[in-house]
Amino acid sequence: MATANLAARATSEHEQRAAVLHVSVLGGFRVELQDAAGPVSAWQRRSAKMLTKLLATSAEHALHREQIVELLWPNVEMDSALNSLGKALHAMRHAFEPDLPPRAGSAYVRTSDSMVSLAMENVQIDADRFQRMAEEALRTADVPASEKALAAYGGELLPEDRYADWCTERRGFLAELRIRLLLELAEAHEARGSYNLAADRLREVLREDASREAVHRRVMRLYVHMGMPDQAVRQFQLCEAALRSELDLAPHAETLSLVREILENQVSAHSALPHAQPVERAPSIPREPQVDVGGRPFVGRWHLIDALCATVVADPPSGEGMIVVSGEAGVGKTRFLEELAADARRREVTVLWGGSGAHAAHFACGPFAIALEGHVGSCSEHEREELARRYPALARFVPSLGLGAQPPPLAADPADDHLGLLSEIVRMLTDLGRRQPLLLVLGDLHDVDPFSLDLVRYLAHLATQRPWLLIAAVREERLDVAPELRRMLIAMMRERLCWKLELLRDAVPDRSGDDELLKHVYSQSRGNPLLVLELVRELTAERACPAAFDDGASPRSANGRPFLSSLEVTRLAHVDRTTRRVLELVAAANIAAIALGDLRASACLLEPAMTDSELLDALDRGLDLRLLEERGGGYGFRHPLVGAALYESLSLHRREQLDAALSRTHSGRGLECSCESCSVCLAS
């Protein structure tokens, strides 16, 4: 009796001073004693290692000996199997504790009443830790806790035993728990406006299970919101392939409808994300209806301005450091930036305005020079002197800093001047950001010089960790003729440095009154705010003084003649001669859409005649520049007013040539040409 008590006391003391045993089953099997030089490797029997895996992955980490026998020795007689179990237990104990005395109890393995279990007060299992962290994070909807739980997931449960039935259920449970974390994080990032981060989390889900169609749809919508519809279509193709290969199913109707809308360019940045939660933001500031100097009211888009201002004042900064506002000419990008800047100032944000026109591109680093000059010029004389002392390299760059001061000499190498200038700009922005959040508005990116673009990318890197937000505008049609800028923006979006916000055309509101007038305005402008405004002005002027417009000109000229010249220059300034000739032909047709066959026939009747390959290449460029669109099996101007503007700008003899070619095409009587393929030649 005394001997038994002494043995029990010795076992208890041994267990109390035992080091913690760490068992890893995520990403691969590994057993390690705390503070040991290396992992446990002295497994005398393979069955000892398998027994450890069984206990580590089972519920409560305890199994009846008959369960163990059935799993490890299923076709062996019971007596022999129990003997093998005893040997496995012995090898398992001594693998953990090589110096364990004979008949001493193990600090890590217990046997009692036919049960074999791990002593969990001395054993820690990574799968259990991940489960606790994940369930707590999901319960509290805590983003940092979810990130920590994901970091604790070391990988698939026992990948070396992937096809063993005894761990399948536990593996699936933990993998699904990880997917729930990823979906929760994606939703949180989406709600905060960090769309690249949200897409990254969703792609991790699809790497785990590519047949999750709803997740594919969410990724497609995120791509649309980031201004990458081509990637959204590519995601649909991946979804379709996964469904067919894994489940032998076709995509759901909802998925097909979404990709159809994307291809038709009908998904807006707002409808693309129906599941996004409201962004946490400062309370909205009550506003009176805003009117600019031209008397134009600013309506709608306040929700976007609220969200962007909330991003500026977020503490700590989260997500991308730059936003690119895109859209076609006249859609309201500059007005949107103006209202954003005004609203940010009301929220005590420092706003640096870098201009919104091409004048900022007339000298190196123009937008930054204008932005800093605007800020410095508003400072007192004493403040300007202090700024000149702190940032001497800016004295030559910012005129207000050079007043009454001797600027530093130019460097021997111009590259050194650029480096010094870059360093001073970053220092000044950093100091301004310490006082209050900073919004830097850069205007039109397609007009800035190469050094400014390099500086934009560098500042976007810094802005992800600082209380800054950079915002710039681009025209979609200019991106197609500026491949370097397009590549830069795509790279920045992939690096999660910026995201793109596309302003879409507004719809004409459904109001009672002059319905015919509203339909006419919308059919000609397609909802473009600039074109709506100009068209209404022209129609108003025509009604007030009809004689001024009754000069026998083409009916098309009454759709906005006084501003046609400037509009034509704005939209067609970057078009090559061949493309312009095709656009002139489409404009002369004066119909909603002209068929490809009629275009081919008319093009070969021009002087000089146009080859088929020239015509097709020009049509592609017109589509890329968003001047033309495919409509009803033919081609028409995206904005009818642009076609009217182009036709109105033509000389009389050029109009007559185009009209004659189109007329002969329609009548089937053509001049001789060498194409031998158009409808006119075939008819003759």
Image (spheres, rainbow, N blue to C red):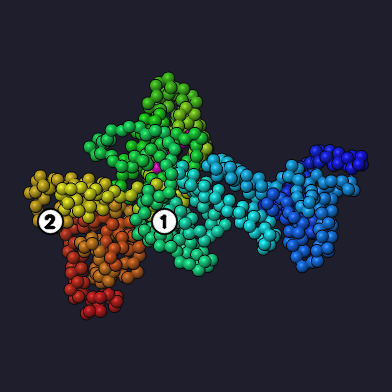
Q: What type is the residue that disc 1 sits on?
A: Pro
Q: Quickly name the residue at label 1.
A: 229
Residue 337 vs residue 44, the one in the foreground: 44
Is 660 part of what is drawn in magenta?
no
Where does the N terminus fall, quadrant-wise?
top right
> In this image, 78 relative to 465: left or right?
right
Residue 361, visible in the rendered structure: no
Residue 485 vs residue 31, the one in the foreground: 31
Q: Does residue 360 lie above or below 527 as drawn?
A: above
- Which element is circle 1 on? helix
Which label is found at residue 553? 2
Tell me the distance, in whole angstroms, between the alpha carbons under discs 1 and 2: 42 Å
1 or 2: tag closer to the N-terminus = 1
At 71% from the left and 50% from the top, the residue drawn is 61
At 31% from the left and 60% from the top, the residue drawn is 629
Residue 416 vs residue 59, the one in the foreground: 59
Tell me where residue 149 sits by quadrant.
top right
Coordinates of residue 76 in the picture (x, y in percent):
79, 66
Which label is found at residue 93? none
Coordinates of residue 100 in the picture (x, y in percent):
87, 46
Coordinates of residue 241 in the picture (x, y in percent):
50, 65
Tell me where residue 122 sits by quadrant.
top right
> In this image, 14 relative to 625: left or right?
right
Bounds of the magenta segment: 466-472
Instruction: Please state which of the two labelled residues, at mark 1 or mark 2, is closer to the viewer.
Output: 1
Q: What type is the residue that disc 2 sits on?
A: Ala
At 75% from the left and 55% from the top, the residue drawn is 64
